[in-house]
Image (cartoon, rainbow, N blue to C red):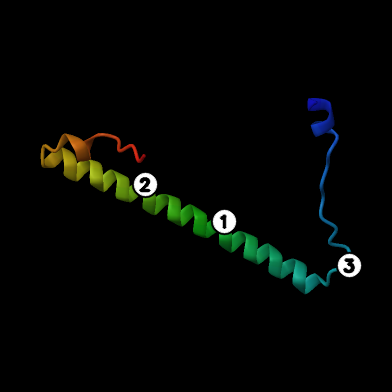
Amino acid sequence: MSRVHSDISVTPDFSGLPASVISGLQHLANAAAGLVVVLAGLGIAVSVVGILVGSWSANPHLASARRWA
């Protein structure tokens, strides 16, 4: 079964697109990647602030890792 999955290859064909569209798609991909990095950084910062507030207020529920169910 794994041999069948390794034989599958999907590659986009950009040969029929104008250069300006390809350039625009590259800029869009770069902007999306940058946005994801910024959002990940904000998530980490919010988590660190929550842990710090929890430890300073002696609240073990905020200071520990939260598990969302």
Q: Which residue is mark 1?
A: 33
User: Among all residues in the image, which is located at the extreme front?
Assistant: 69
Q: Is residue 66 above or below residue 32?
A: above
Left or right of 47 on screen, residue 40: right
Residue 47 location, quadrant:
top left
Point 64% across, 60% down: residue:
29
Q: Amino acid at mark 3?
A: Gly
Q: CA distance from mark 1 to mark 2?
A: 17 Å
- Disc 3 crowd, CA 10 A, few/some/many (<14, 14-19, 20+): few
Q: Nearer the viewer, residue 5 or 37?
A: 5
* Residue beneath disc 3: 16
Q: Earlier in the sequence, mark 3 or mark 2?
A: 3
Quadrant of the drawing holding the N terminus: top right
Give the residue at x 69% y 63%.
26
Camera-nearest residue between 57 and 19: 57
Which residue: 51% across, 55% down? 36
Query: What residue is pinned by disc 2?
Result: 44
Between 5 and 44, the one lying in front of the other is 5
Give whichever of 17, 4 is nearer the camera. 4
12 left or right, relative to 23: right
The CA distance from mark 1 to mark 3 is: 25 Å
Instruction: Please state which amino acid type lies under the numbered disc 2.
Output: Ile
Identify the amino acid type marked 1: Ala
Label 1, secondary structure: give it. helix
The span from disc 3 to disc 2 (Cα, nearest Å) is 42 Å
Q: Are marks 3 and 2 in contact (CB under 8 Å)?
A: no
